[in-house]
Amino acid sequence: MIQELKAADGRLAVLIAGVGGAVSTTMIAGVMAARRGLAKPIGSVTQMGRMRRQDGREQLIKEMVPIAGLDSLVFGGWDIFPDNALEAARCAEVLSEKDLKGVADELATIRPMAAAFDPRWAKRLHGTHTLQGATRREMIEHLRGDIRRFMADNKCSRAVVLWAASTEIFLPMTDEHRSLESLDRAIDANNTEVISPSMCYAYAALSEGVPFIMGAPNLCVDIPAMWELAAQKHVPIAGKDFKSGQTLMKTVLAPMFKTRLLGVSGWFSTNILGNRDGEVLDDPDNFKTKEVSKLSVIESILDADEQPDLYKDIYHKVRINYYPPRKDNKEAWDNIDLFGWMGYPMEIKVNFLCRDSILAAPIALDLVLFSDLAARAGMSGIQTWLSFFCKSPMHDFDHVPEHDLFTQWRIVKQTLRTLVGEKEPDYLS
């Protein structure tokens, strides 16, 4: 239900699980640099995106709808390591010392709160700044207190919680996840087999009436129990998994094949990366979670039921390899075997040398600001219009997720137009 938009008055707390990670520190440093006029927020839809208004005018999105200003953002969060944001950013080695120097004073003031963490869910990580011995219910209550204290201490009128921490081990949906009542029973029983740490963050945020964003492929807020809690609290939820590199390319190329009616027989994808995310994904149990997220894209866009002659037997393989020398600079290779007129074969090879956190940082910012906008508009539950930013878009059992980047972008624009009471402009002369 969309109501009259409330203005973005007051300060907005941006609380991040994994605040010391590469994506988080890159995003925070970039926002601080933009506030000081030291850098431009390139890649951010909320900051640089434009739309054509119904009357034909081109306008910045942040002028069309009341997006929270960058000056109003107050950053904080949790991490399994005690380093402040400046120390963590230096450790991540994404940004140069020259760029960090311009915002070093501010970054150094961001010190993480102790994280709700269970090493069984990310076995390659050995956190030292964690809630020791806490049950799942104690984790949730501690996180709720953290949210309230941070908002009070920093005089924030609103908050958003973002998961930008590591991918957890693969978890299929179980009976405990299918209703809020059964989830609560599992939490009270401290069932650590089905209640992940990320679920504790989501439960805490929603219980406090705060929007929650899942930036990893974890099973977390995309379960009926969390949908029920979000509906009770009238809170938006969004996710999952930042669509930043190789999958972004797939959501561009696959719609082209589909639109031009070109057949695809195989799509092989592999990555090398050396950051903390790569280290975590080097464990097969954690990679399984990412693999499921990445594999869903091609099958969804290239629908074999719709075009069996073109897409019936696609062989799709995804690999991620941990290679420490690359650090945050990921290299993604794709080999696509396709066929055209009269069945003649062709190949496309893509070699994307990308910077993982540089691509993900503006996505994280946009999801935060758009989730806050949705909350002020009275929107709650799954924000399907934010699928544009997500690798594995959240959806309920009655809907199929949309993966086509261009269709997703049209849905974003339709939603923003609805918020200001406009229709799509007529492009016919």
Image: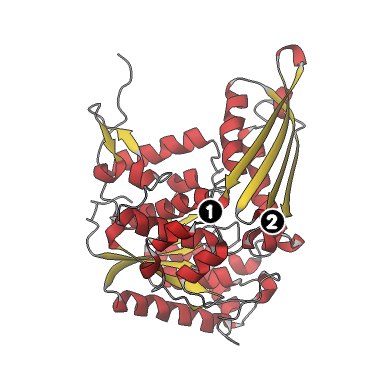
Residue at 54 percent across and 61 percent down: it is 22
Query: Residue 48: percent from the left, percent from the top?
Result: 35, 42
Location of residue 91 with respect to 357 vertically, above or below? below
Q: Residues within 10 Å of mark 2 (few under 14, many from 20)?
A: few
Q: Can you name the residue that lies furthest to the bottom here?
A: 133
User: In this figure, which residue is indicated by the disc labeled 2?
Assistant: 325
Q: Secondary structure at mark 2?
A: helix
In this rendering, position of residue 246 left or right of residue 4: right
Q: Residues within 10 Å of mark 1 (few under 14, many from 20)?
A: many
* Mark 2 vs mark 1, CA separation in Å: 16 Å
Question: Which picture quadrant has residue 70?
Answer: bottom left
**Which numbered mark, 2 or 1, is in the foreground of this view?**
2
Query: Residue 259: percent from the left, percent from the top?
Result: 57, 23
In this rendering, position of residue 46 left or right of residue 357: left
Location of residue 119 with respect to 294 vertically, above or below? below
Amino acid type assigned to the residue bearing label 2 in the image:
Pro
Q: Quadrant of the C terminus?
A: top left
Q: Can you name the residue that lies furthest to the front here?
A: 98
Q: Nearer the viewer, residue 292 or 335?
A: 335
Q: Nearer the viewer, residue 102 or 244?
A: 102
Query: Residue 177: percent from the left, percent from the top?
Result: 59, 66
In this rendering, position of residue 133 left or right of residue 419: right
Location of residue 291 with respect to 181 vertically, above or below? above
Q: Secondary structure at mark 1?
A: helix
Amino acid type assigned to the residue bearing label 1 in the image:
Ser
Residue at 69 percent across and 56 percent down: it is 325
In this rendering, position of residue 158 left or right of residue 381: left
- Whether residue 94 is visible to the viewer of this picture, yes or no, is yes
Q: Nearer the viewer, residue 139 or 48?
A: 48
User: In this figure, which residue is indicated by the disc labeled 1?
Assistant: 357
